[in-house]
């Protein structure tokens, strides 16, 4: 009998899971649950494939990758401190299941459905019997310990919290590599092996980085900054989310009056998202959501039809950066755009607006610290580069139909000249 399973991964190459090892038998059993297999149907980068055509990877592949990273780090840390081996079931389980609670199109769900994937990951780990029963076979407290890692700040194990939910954790170490590969960009070439080789324990019991790893961490944080600016916060993502937000808002306001078809699970996602049962949560994924969008594109009412058509056919609204303008000037541009909307028979509240977005800089209070064998220090105290990466940046976009893009941009140019 073959007790090994091999995942051929584009980032980590062969990921071999050996069921002769109890902790990896647990992983194999968790992978085979319906809730984890559902992640095959949740895109890692949401609607980013509308811009980066290769961004079709799933939360399934990412979650397998995070487990792989966690296992590599575990093997390094247990060499330094053999007692860390007592954490392997918690670490491996949390790494694999950390994204279990994502809704359709991943983080987009958090905006359009007011969905919290971390709370849902915790809920599924603790209360979804097929998963909690597997975990309990390997430790009666495993569901609670893993679930608490996803949401609790005051945690029973600081090293585990650092590895599962911090500024430099297993999740980020996988997704920067994976998202860079899948989008065809070259920003996310993280020196994973160098970072892992520089990990150690500090006197306070937490995980730290040796001085030799500072350059690799600098590289990691620069790449994180670039990936957010060029991919995660790209204006196409913002426009797509705007359209989907408006679709859900319109349905909430008008579906009962217009006799709109919605299946029961999707209805609960839209109207009772804070009261979802597990069966309804698991019934929704990208395929189900896209089916509804396709249906509404053909059989609904205006302006819902037009918005669904825009998204499905990738005939999106446009967006221009107005961050450099004062708030008053931004409102003047918005008034100009809304006037154009009305003249062109668009609902100005739906097809036009300002979208604010924020990029949060590196936070050292939720990250590794440097330990040189004598002294512990913050990363930014040892690196001017990291210090500059701590600043956050807010940007503002004006969103509008493409028919009058030239007029909007000409008006923005006039305002820019007067700044």
Image (cartoon, grey):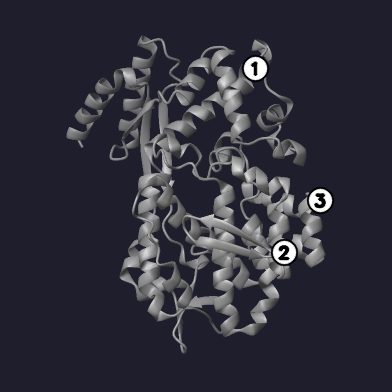
Mark whose residue sits in front, 1 or 2: 2
First in residue order: circle 1 vs circle 2: 2
- Between disc 3 and disc 1, whose residue precedes? 3
At 31% across and 70% down in the image, what residue appears? Answer: 384
In this view of the protein, which residue sits in the foreground, 353 or 226? 226
Looking at the picture, tell me which residue is in the foreground, 403 or 298.
298
Look at the image and tell me in which quarter the N terminus lies.
Answer: bottom right
Q: Is residue 189 left or right of residue 80?
A: left
Q: Which mark is residue 255?
A: 1
> Residue tagged by mark 3?
129
Residue at the left extreme?
A: 417
Query: Spatial distance from mark 1 to mark 2, Cα to Cα?
Result: 47 Å
Q: Residues within 10 Å of mark 2 (few under 14, many from 20)?
A: some
Comparing marks 2 and 3, which lies closer to the viewer? 2
- Total numbered labels placed on residues in the image: 3
Q: Tag 3: Cα neighbours inside 10 Å, few (<14), some, or many (≥20)?
A: few
**In this figure, which residue is indicated by the disc labeled 2?**
25
Q: Position of residue 170 (x, y in %)?
A: 54, 63
Q: Residue at x 38, y 74 (%)?
A: 214
Label 1 environment density (alpha carbons within 10 Å; few <14, some 14–19, many ≥20):
some
Residue at the farthest front position? 1
């Amino acid at each position: 009998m073959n007790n090994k399973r091999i995942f051929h991964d584009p980032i980590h190459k062969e990921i071999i899971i050996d069921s002769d090892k109890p902790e990896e038998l647990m992983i194999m059993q968790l992978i085979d649950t319906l809730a984890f297999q559902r992640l095959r149907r949740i895109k890692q980068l949401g609607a980013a494939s509308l811009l980066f055509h290769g961004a079709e990877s799933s939360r399934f592949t990412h979650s397998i990758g995070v487990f792989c990273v966690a296992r590599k780090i575990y093997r390094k840390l247990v060499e330094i401190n053999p007692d860390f081996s007592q954490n392997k079931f918690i670490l491996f389980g949390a790494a694999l299941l950390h994204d279990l609670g994502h809704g359709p199109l991943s983080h987009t769900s958090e905006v359009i459905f007011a969905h919290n994937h971390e709370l849902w990951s915790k809920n599924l780990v603790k209360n979804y019997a097929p998963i909690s029963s597997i975990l309990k076979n390997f430790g009666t407290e495993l569901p609670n310990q893993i679930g608490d890692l996803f949401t609790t700040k005051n945690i029973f194990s600081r090293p585990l919290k650092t590895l599962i939910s911090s500024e430099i954790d297993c999740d980020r170490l996988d997704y920067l590599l994976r998202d860079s590969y899948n989008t065809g960009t070259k920003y996310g070439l993280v020196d994973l092996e160098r970072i892992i080789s520089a990990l150690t324990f500090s006197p306070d019991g937490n995980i730290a980085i040796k001085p030799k790893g500072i350059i690799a961490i600098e590289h990691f944080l620069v790449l994180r900054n670039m990936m957010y600016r060029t991919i995660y916060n790209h204006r196409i993502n913002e426009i797509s989310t705007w359209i989907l937000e408006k679709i859900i808002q319109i349905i909430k306001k008008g579906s009962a009056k217009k006799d709109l078809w919605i299946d029961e699970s999707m209805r609960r996602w839209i109207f009772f998202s804070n009261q979802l049962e597990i069966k309804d949560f698991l019934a929704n994924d990208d395929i189900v959501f896209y089916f509804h969008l396709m249906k509404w594109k053909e059989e609904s009412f205006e302006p819902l039809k037009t918005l669904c058509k825009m998204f499905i056919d990738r005939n999106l609204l446009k967006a221009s950066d107005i961050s450099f303008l004062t708030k008053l000037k931004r409102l003047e541009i918005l008034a100009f755009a809304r006037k154009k909307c009305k003249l062109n028979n668009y609902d100005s509240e739906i097809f036009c607006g300002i979208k604010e977005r924020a990029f949060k800089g590196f936070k050292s209070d939720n990250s590794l610290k440097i330990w040189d064998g004598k002294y512990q220090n913050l990363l930014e105290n040892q690196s001017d580069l990291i210090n500059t990466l701590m600043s956050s940046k807010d940007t503002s976009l004006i969103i509008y139909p493409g028919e009058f893009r030239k007029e909007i941009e000409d008006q923005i140019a006039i305002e820019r000249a007067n700044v």
